[in-house]
Image (spheres, rainbow, N blue to C red):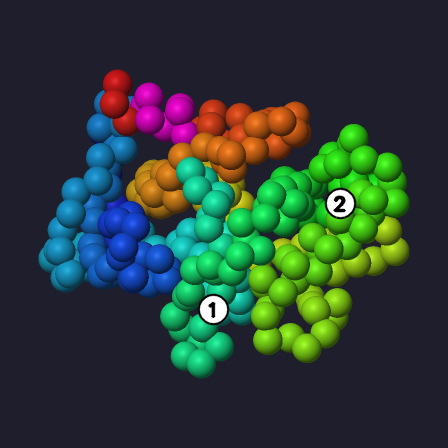
């Protein structure tokens, strides 16, 4: 049995890499869409910028213009790790534009590996000894610790190059023997946003909103998680956990 039609006004994301509006979380629209479940599948139909007459007060879904969209108000750094490894900083002058970090230290393997370990660790927290064992198991502890300190310093400078005392950065803190990366409200990561959208979709009882959230999640999935990192087992586990919903969604869409 087919469900009733519901209407949602929402922002659309084209997903094009060069689209400034999508990259800054603005999107296009908002536009009105009609949603209906037919034979167990949710069908979305574009309506336009204005709602149809029958949508006035009848079966109208909630305004989903901001549903699933990243709240970038307080975010100063963005990291894209799905199919790429790109770090962006908010431009200090405009406060709006994002600039890709092209500093030489961004290409250093120890800096990239440390950042990968931090974003893959539960709660974005990693013990110093654990980091040393993961990144430089072949080195003696003193040498490895020195490399870790240099990598931490370089990473803080990448995040906030204008900060006179990098050690005071809130984006990468050291508490006792633990390194702690800032949460999603300050340091946005596409993989975590992907997870959040899927969680919202699972929690939603509205077919239209669920479909929208799933579409936004799939737009974020540009490829495998940190494709360059292959030798750390729990990073591979994280990669596989992100692959499963993407593959399931792709199968559902095309079959």
Q: Which residues are magenta?
A: 246-252
Residue 249 lies in the magenta-colored region: yes
- Residue that appears at 26% across and 49% down: 16
Question: Helix, strand or loop at disc 1?
Answer: strand
Q: Is 10 one of the magenta-colored residues?
A: no
* Residue at the disc numbered 2: 126
State the mark number for residue 54. Answer: none
Who's the residue at 25% across and 46% down the image?
A: 6
Q: Would you say 231 lies left or right of 72 here?
A: right
Q: Determine the image quadrant of residue 167.
A: bottom right
The residue positioned 41% from the left and 55% from the top of the image is: 69
Q: Tell me: 83 left or right of 17.
A: right
Outermost bottom residue: 93
Give the CA distance from mark 2 to mark 1: 26 Å
Q: Secondary structure at mark 2?
A: strand
Residue 90 got which mark? 1
Prevailing SS of the magenta stretch: helix
Name the image quarter holding residue 31: bottom left
User: Can residue 240 be seen by looking at this rendering?
Assistant: yes
Residue 145 place in picture, x, y as percent? 82, 47
Asked whether 154 or 70 is in front, the reply is 154
The answer to which of marks 2 and 1 sits earlier in the sequence is 1
> Percent from the top left, x then y, of residue 143?
83, 44
Q: Is residue 186 left or right of residue 146?
A: left
Could you classify mark 1 by the number of other residues whose Cα lies within 10 Å: few (under 14), some (14-19), or many (20 or more)? many
The C terminus lies in quadrant: top left
Image quarter where the N terminus lies is: top left
Q: Residue at x 21, y 49 (%)?
A: 33
């Amino acid at each position: 049995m087919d469900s009733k039609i519901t209407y949602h006004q929402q922002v659309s994301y084209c997903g094009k890499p060069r689209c400034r509006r999508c990259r800054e979380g603005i999107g296009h629209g908002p536009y009105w869409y009609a949603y209906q479940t037919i034979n167990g599948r949710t069908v979305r139909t574009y309506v336009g910028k204005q709602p149809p007459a029958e949508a006035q007060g009848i079966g109208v879904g909630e305004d989903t213009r901001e549903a699933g969209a990243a709240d970038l108000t307080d975010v100063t750094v963005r990291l894209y790790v799905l199919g790429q490894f790109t770090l962006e900083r908010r431009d200090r002058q405009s406060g709006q534009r994002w600039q890709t970090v092209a500093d030489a230290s961004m290409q250093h393997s120890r800096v990239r590996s440390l950042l990968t370990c931090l974003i893959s660790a539960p709660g974005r927290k990693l013990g110093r000894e654990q980091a040393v064992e993961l990144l430089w198991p072949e080195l003696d502890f003193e040498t490895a610790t020195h490399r870790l300190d240099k990598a931490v310093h370089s990473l803080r400078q990448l995040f906030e190059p204008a900060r006179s005392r990098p050690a005071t950065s809130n984006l990468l803190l050291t508490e006792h023997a633990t390194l702690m990366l800032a949460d999603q409200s300050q340091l946005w990561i596409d993989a975590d946003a992907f997870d959040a959208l899927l969680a919202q979709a699972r929690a939603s009882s509205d077919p239209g909103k669920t479909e929208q959230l799933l579409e936004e999640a799939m737009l974020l999935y540009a490829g495998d998680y940190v494709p360059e990192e292959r030798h750390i087992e729990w990073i591979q586990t994280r990669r596989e956990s992100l692959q499963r919903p993407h593959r399931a969604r792709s199968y559902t869409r095309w079959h």
